[in-house]
Amino acid sequence: MIAIVTLAGCASASDPASGDNPVLEGAGDVALGADLYAANCAQCHGTDATGTDQGPPFVHDVYVPSHHADGAFLLAVRNGVQPHHWDFGPMPPRPGLSDQDVADIVAYVRSVQRDAGLIE
């Protein structure tokens, strides 16, 4: 799941139809995010976020905040994603995840990226 991903306490985001980039406010919970990631993202993006034959890795320069900000994960969860960096099929929307769920997932993904030395 790309992007997976809302990212915070009382997360809010601008209307994607307006063309604005959504912003997740507050901080997500890494532990909750790990559980949500395992249940909703790992099948395609790998249990360790290194990808599978069904989805790209999040432990990659393409998904660091300077290239895909946290709000990109929220948009992906809300709207799905057409492939643009990888040769995987499109990611469908994940309507069962709240903005807070996405914030938690993003917190987890960022922690994995940090552990891999991709971000500080």
Image (spheres, grey):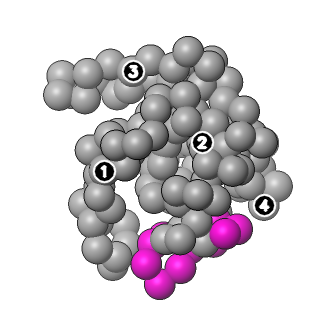
Three-letter amino acid code of the residue under disc 2? Val
For mark 4, give the secondary structure. loop
Give the Cα distance between marks 2 and 4.
15 Å
Q: Which residue is mark 3?
A: 13
Is label 2 in contact with label 4 (beta carbons under 8 Å)? no
Cα gap from disc 1 to disc 2, whole angstroms:
16 Å
Q: Secondary structure at mark 2?
A: helix
Relative to 52, say whether 27 is above or below: above
Q: Residue at x 52, y 38 (%)?
A: 102
Q: Which residue is mark 2?
A: 106
Q: Residue at x 40, y 42 (%)?
A: 96
Left or right position of 110 against 55 = right
Residue at x 60% of width, y 44% of height: 105
In the rendered structure, find residue 9 and report the number of the disc placed on it: none
Specify the amino acid type for callout 1: Pro
User: Residue 19: horizontal and vertical position, in percent?
Assistant: 21, 27
Q: Amino acid at mark 4?
A: Ala
Do callouts 4 and 1 mark residues in contact (Cβ within 8 Å)?
no
Mark pair 4, 3: CA separation: 28 Å
- Residue 112 magenta-highlighted: no
